Amino acid sequence: MGCFVVLFALISPRLAIVFVWLFSNVFERAYDDWWVPVLGFFFLPWTTLAWAFTWDSGRAVEGFDWFIVGLAFVIDIGSFVGGRRARD
């Protein structure tokens, strides 16, 4: 299933979030509340996916995992800035 998630994430991170939510319990294990992934779906989809999968791989985000989550955050912020710049 991991290969399909990566494929869907390359197409659209929001599509990957929907498939992960429907076909696994990764978000239930990684997040305590339901509203955090919902907010992540709308505002920070790459960061939401990165946090869930890095947390699920070792039951904590530590070491190199923080680099992956940080990179996902930079990609999310870059998409907001790029979208705003394209509208102007």
Image (cartoon, helix red, strand yellow):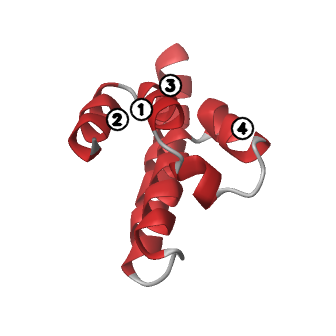
First in residue order: circle 1 vs circle 4 = 1
Q: CA distance from mark 2 to mark 1?
A: 5 Å
Which residue is under mark 1? 16
The spot of residue 33 in percent (x, y) is: 78, 50
Image quadrant for the C terminus?
top right
Name the N-terminal-most of marks 2 and 1.
Answer: 2
The residue under label 3 is which amino acid type?
Answer: Gly
Looking at the rendered structure, the kind of residue marked 1 is: Ala
Front in this rendered view, residue 41 or 87 = 41
Circle 2/circle 1 CB separation < 8 Å: yes
Return the residue at label 2.
Answer: 9
Badge nearest the viewer, 3 or 1? 1
- Name the mark on residue 39: 4
**Tag on residue 67?**
none
From the top left corner, tell me how far across and down residue 87 is, in percent. Answer: 53, 15
Q: Helix, strand, or loop for circle 3? A: helix
The residue that disc 3 covers is: 83
Compared with residue 67, is residue 53 higher up or lower down, i.e. above or below? above
Spatial separation of the CA atoms under disc 2 and disc 3 = 19 Å
Which element is circle 2 on?
A: helix
Mark 3 neighbour density, 10 Å: few (under 14) some (14–19) many (20 or more): few
Secondary structure category for the residue under label 1:
helix
Measure the alpha-carbon separation of dots 3 and 1: 21 Å
Report the Cα–Cα distance between label 4 and label 3: 19 Å
Q: Earlier in the sequence, mark 3 or mark 1?
A: 1
CB atoms at circles 1 and 4 under 8 Å apart? no
Task: Residue type at mark 4: give it.
Answer: Leu
Assign a secondary structure to mark 4: helix
